[in-house]
Image: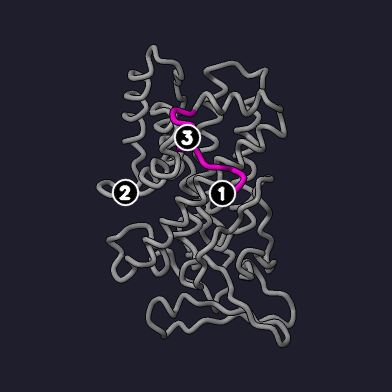
Amino acid sequence: MGLALTLGCAGEAETAEALEESAEEFSTAPGEANHEEITSTALSFLKPAVLTALKTGNVSTDALLALSNAAHFDDCNFSGGAAFVAAKQAEAVRALGPSVLLPDGDAAAMLAFGHSLHALQDFYSHTNWVELGGDVLVDQSLTAFPALTPYSVIPSTGFIVVQGAKPRQTAVARDADAPYPEYAVVTVRKRRTTAYGLVSGTVDYEPGNYCPAPVAMTHEELNKDKTTVSGRTEQHLAAKSLAIRQTRHEWCRLNQLAHDAWGDAGTERLAAWVADPSAAPDCTTE
């Protein structure tokens, strides 16, 4: 899908209107457009045309990459999801290079960045991060999004990434007969150490399932995508809050990556996307 983009005043209204029409085609939840709302709330300081382009790129992920579990952090494919985020943000940074002319470069950057935001927003609603008590971001660095390798420890919480065959002398478990949210609590025991295990829901139409059978849950059993999912309103709101915070932080990451790659020219390119600098995040603290 191509995105036309005008950052100046002339034609901005027409561009925003056209992009909104494109975005409607990819609305992820008619009547409850959560990806759009999360992005708008987190990045409200951006110009309307830019914000619309990012939302279009975000929600188009469900149509363009519907069969990619990495693009949605499904099927316990955490290594794939992390690599997807890092690759899409690297793609955005390349498009911001001085040799890539406007408007094509910015449009490509917004599309790629929007894809990365979709995946990270899905991370909180498709995994058991919230059910395990996770109330901090999965990553708050300003370097490239880190690898999430199978059975590694996530520094911010101590959760273990459960993906694929478990290592020797390691056991994974959950109480499948417990009520929600208790049935979503996974533990990983290695020798005499026990920690919480991070998993995500399985989706049967997406190729590749990396969730160990003893702790596997379907997407329907675990997702917190909407307020209408019965009995999960509290967890939905918690996941949504974390997704807003992560999305806002990703703006800081993108700025740092662009500066690392292109110096002041990179950050100046992104500054042109901003409508209200006073409302932008302080990237030294967020």
Main SS class of the magenta portion in the image: loop
- Please say whether residue 261 is one of the residues in the magenta stretch: no
Which is closer to the viewer, label 3 or label 2?
3
The relative height of residue 46 versus residue 242 in the rendered view (above or below) is: above
Kindly identify which numbered label has been placed on residue 278. Answer: 3
Helix, strand or loop under label 1: loop
Answer few, some or many: residues within 10 Å of disc 1's Cα (few below 14, many 20 plus, some between 14 and 19).
some
Query: Relative to residue 194, is residue 199 depicted above or below?
Result: above
Residue 262 falls in image quadrant = top right
Q: Mark 1 points at which residue?
A: 286
Mark 2–mark 1 Cα distance, whole angstroms, equals 29 Å
Amino acid type indicated by mark 2: Ala
Q: Residue furthest top?
A: 10
For disc 2, the marked residue is: 29
Magenta range: 274-285
Dot in front, 1 or 3? 3
Q: Which amino acid does label 3 sit on?
A: Ser
Mark pair 3, 2: CA separation: 32 Å
